[in-house]
Image (cartoon, rainbow, N blue to C red):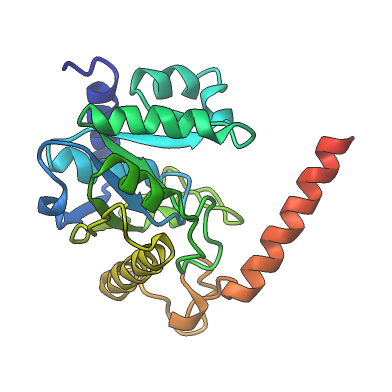
């Protein structure tokens, strides 16, 4: 099937990365099935993660249909692009419709991308996962492929400065071995296993990236337990809670 929107967008992104002197490295793309349905489950450290996780799919010869919040599809520029790339809108007040659409895509042999943390991790560790990725893979009878991304947070992340034209950065993407998801298996146990695999992949990327915090540097883009100054997981939970309260208050007004 031709991709009149997806293919040009990917090509444009690659041109942009080269113009900025960015180094984007994908490892493990061979773990993404070359045909048939699969759920690609990625960690979430930046607003650009769907681009980088999607590049892993492209390297494997697959276009990933990401599940993304409905608001993105309502944007005057982003909306037409998201629909043209056949991504899947998620209305949190009516989630069953998006799950049905994702399941239909899986059964037609598509790769569906999901961020099981639901929101960006301020601590740059893997947050508690929602069970949707496992449930979707089980329902579709397809493998669950863990993917870790690292580096996009320095360009555009929650609570950090925007450096979309930052030059010479490194973005690392690692695809892990597929996690079997038999329908009779314990979904909670599978979700915990997915969490462990994502955290392991992420820590490997964090150790391998050339961009490490210097002594005394305010490294907001690196996790606290590895010498950065990002919020700890506990602090991140408090910040997320405060954001939810503020959002609810704005909605009520």
Q: Quadrant of the N terminus?
A: top left
Asked whether residue 16 is in view, the answer is: yes
Residue at the extreme front: 184
Determine the image quadrant of residue 160.
bottom right
Rendered position, 56 above or below 36:
below
99 or 55: which is nearer to us?
99
For image coordinates 31% across by 73% down, the residue present is: 200
Give residue 14's position: percent from left, percent from top: 24, 36
Give x and y (percent) for residue 195: 39, 66
Q: Residue at x 27, y 55 (%)?
A: 181
- Left or right, 107 with reference to 44: left
Question: Residue 20, can we see it?
Answer: no
Residue 122: x %, y % from top left? 56, 62
Q: Number of labelled discs?
A: 0
Residue, x 41% and y 24% (percent of image)?
82
- Residue 78: x, y in percent? 48, 24
Q: Which corner quadrant holds the C terminus?
A: top right
Q: Between residues 19 and 37, which one lies in front from this camera angle?
A: 37
Picture quadrant of residue 5:
top left
């Amino acid at each position: 099937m031709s991709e009149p929107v997806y293919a040009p967008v990917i090509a444009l992104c690659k041109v942009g990365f080269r113009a900025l002197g960015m180094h984007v490295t994908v490892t493990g793309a061979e773990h993404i099935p070359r045909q048939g349905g699969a759920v690609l489950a990625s960690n979430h450290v930046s607003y650009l993660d769907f681009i980088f996780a999607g590049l892993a799919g492209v390297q494997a010869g697959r276009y990933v249909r990401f599940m993304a919040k409905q608001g993105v599809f309502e944007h005057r520029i982003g909306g037409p692009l998201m629909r043209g790339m056949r991504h899947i809108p998620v209305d949190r007040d009516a989630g069953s419709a998006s799950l049905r659409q994702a399941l239909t895509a899986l059964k037609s042999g598509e790769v569906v991308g999901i961020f099981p943390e639901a929101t960006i991790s301020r601590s740059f560790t893997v947050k508690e996962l929602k069970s949707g990725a496992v449930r979707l893979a089980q329902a579709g009878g397809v493998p669950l492929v863990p993917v870790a991304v690292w580096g996009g947070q320095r360009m555009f992340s929650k609570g950090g400065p925007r450096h979309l034209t930052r030059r010479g950065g490194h973005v690392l993407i690692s695809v892990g071995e597929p996690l079997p998801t038999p329908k009779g298996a314990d979904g909670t146990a599978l979700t915990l296993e997915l969490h462990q695999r994502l955290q392991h992949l992420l820590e490997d990327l964090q150790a391998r990236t050339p961009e490490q915090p210097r002594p005394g540097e305010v490294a907001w883009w690196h996790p606290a337990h590895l010498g950065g100054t990002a919020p700890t997981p506990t602090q991140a939970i408090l910040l997320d809670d405060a954001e939810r309260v503020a959002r609810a208050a704005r909605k009520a007004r």
